[in-house]
Image: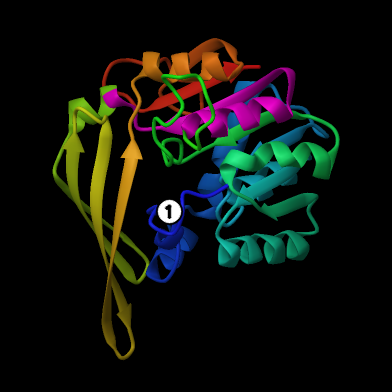
Amino acid sequence: MSDGPSHWTEDFFQGAWLEVQRRIHPVELSRQQAGDLSELLQLEPGERVLDAPCGEGRLSLALAEQGMQTVGVDRCRPLLDDARREAERRGLDCRFEELDLREVDRLGGLEGDPFDAALCIWGSFGYFGDAGVAEGGMAGGDMAFARAVAQVLRPGGHFVIDCPGLEMIMARYSSRGWFDAGPVRVLEQRAWDPLEGTMHVEWTLVHELPEGPRIETRQSAMRIYSAPELARLLSRAGFRRFDLFSDLAGTEWKPGDRMVMVAER
């Protein structure tokens, strides 16, 4: 399934962005988050966890260190290659598949047993937008991703979505921002569309190289959901009972906080 070459995700995750993603989450942070997730979901060694998208596999690897059987899904081949090499180096029980998020239900045929939990961490829910939400159909949008996850979770399994919800965006909105990730400085120019519920961002990546700085630009368009909007979408996708927290450690949510939603299948 694809939105075609014009969709922003097709060419965003390459070049200098790979350096950003490889460096922005230290191993210690990933292990802490994996521990928080294990406690939040009461995961036991041997349980199966889907990590989608997994990027360089940081959480898949950290959860596998705790004894989970993890499967990571992503479309970025260089980061998947990083993840596979690291899993082999550590001798961990991980699998990594190059797959569109909206097609993770194909893992039912590849893997057999259903998953006990699924993760969508670091603001990755909202890539595909509203298509199919109002109609309850697939149509290639975020609904398709949620329904595909529901298809591979066992009854009673949980889907964790960590993202900057609308409540946080409105409380903290700024049209500009920046951060450093190793040799790359990332500059953001943001434009909020209140009718679409979409955050449009122009990213400027300044990559410091021995021969001098290299500048790359990217565009993204992320659908930003409020807590009730996300709960309604997930309900239509086949989930029930929702809990809302402000972080992966299960801190009680309050207005303006980041959104961590845990949905039960």
Residue 5 drawn at (x, y percent): 43, 59
Q: Quadrant of the C terminus?
A: top right
Residue 186 drawn at (x, y percent): 27, 60
Residue 224 drawn at (x, y percent): 33, 31
Q: Nearer the viewer, residue 62 or 163?
A: 163
> In the picture shown, does residue 110 fall above or below 120?
below
Residue 156 drawn at (x, y percent): 71, 15
Side of 180 where 249 appears, left or right: right
Q: Amino acid at mark 1?
A: Thr
Q: Residue furthest left?
A: 175
Q: Nearer the viewer, residue 31 or 71?
A: 71
- Quick check: is 160 in the magenta stretch? yes
**Residue lying at 49% horizontally and 54% vertically, measured from the top left:** 26
Q: Nearer the viewer, residue 4 or 186?
A: 4
> In the picture shown, does residue 227 fall above or below 55?
above
Displayed quadrant of residue 108: top right
Instruction: Tell me if residue 235 can be seen.
Output: yes
Displayed quadrant of residue 238: top right
- SS of the residue at dot 1? helix
**Residue lying at 51% horizontally and 46% vertically, measured from the top left:** 29
Magenta-colored span: 142-166
Q: Which residue is disc 1 drawn over?
A: 9
**Residue lying at 45% horizontally and 19% vertically, measured from the top left:** 135
Q: Nearer the viewer, residue 177 or 100?
A: 100
**Residue lying at 32% horizontally and 50% vertically, measured from the top left:** 220
